[in-house]
Amino acid sequence: MKAQWISIPVDDQARALKFYTDRLGFIPKVDVPVGEDFRWLTVVSPEDTNGVEVVLEPKGHPAADTYTKALRGDGIPINQFAVEDVQAEYERLTRLGVTFTQEPTTMGPATTAVLDDTVGNLIQLIHQEEGKEADLP
């Protein structure tokens, strides 16, 4: 078993695709109409085009909206993306007009920053120092 898709519920698929590609740098992988108003829409990292796909999932169920609003209201990211240098990504994305709710912050072996994806979610950027992973039982 392996993770192949992660879903991020979005308010607007077209706006999500533009943000995730133009700002974050992902590339489109699949774009197939599903019904009248929705698409099976995925993006991938240009560093691993056959890796995990991010599904830009339309919020078609009221519970999805309640869930994402609750996370956002509590300042909790819906997902995390690994980066090599959080500070450099923060600076690059800020120049592109991306809004951050948390500037780069180091917590033990990890440095994180949290951004607003413009389609209803907070996303965390994270870099964890190699060899300094948290100990698991």
Image (tube, rainbow, N blue to C red):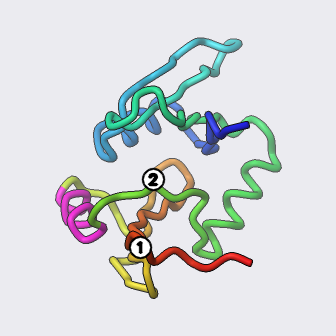
Q: Nearer the viewer, residue 99 or 91?
A: 91
> Do the residues bearing badges 2 and 1 touch, measured as CB atoms within 8 Å?
no
Residue 40, above or below 66: above
Dot 2 falls on a residue whose secondary structure is loop
Q: Nearer the viewer, residue 122 or 82?
A: 82
Identity of the residue drawn at 42% across and 66% down: 126
The picture places residue 60, in percent across and down from the top left corner, at: 74, 35
The picture places residue 12, in percent across and down from the top left corner, at: 54, 36
**Span colored in magenta:** 86-95
- Tell me which secondary structure the magenta stretch mostly adopts: helix
Identity of the residue drawn at 60% across and 12% down: 33
* Residue 100 in magenta stretch: no
Q: Which mark is residue 112?
A: 1
Residue 120, above or below 125: above
Mark 2 surroundings: few (<14), some (14-19) or many (≥20) residues within 10 A = some
Mark 1 surroundings: few (<14), some (14-19) or many (≥20) residues within 10 A = many
- Find residue 34 and report its image quarter: top right
**Of the residues shown, which amino acid type is indicated by label 1?**
Thr
**Of the residues shown, which amino acid type is indicated by label 2?**
Asp
Rendered-image quadrant of the N terminus: top right
Identity of the residue drawn at 63% across and 72% down: 73
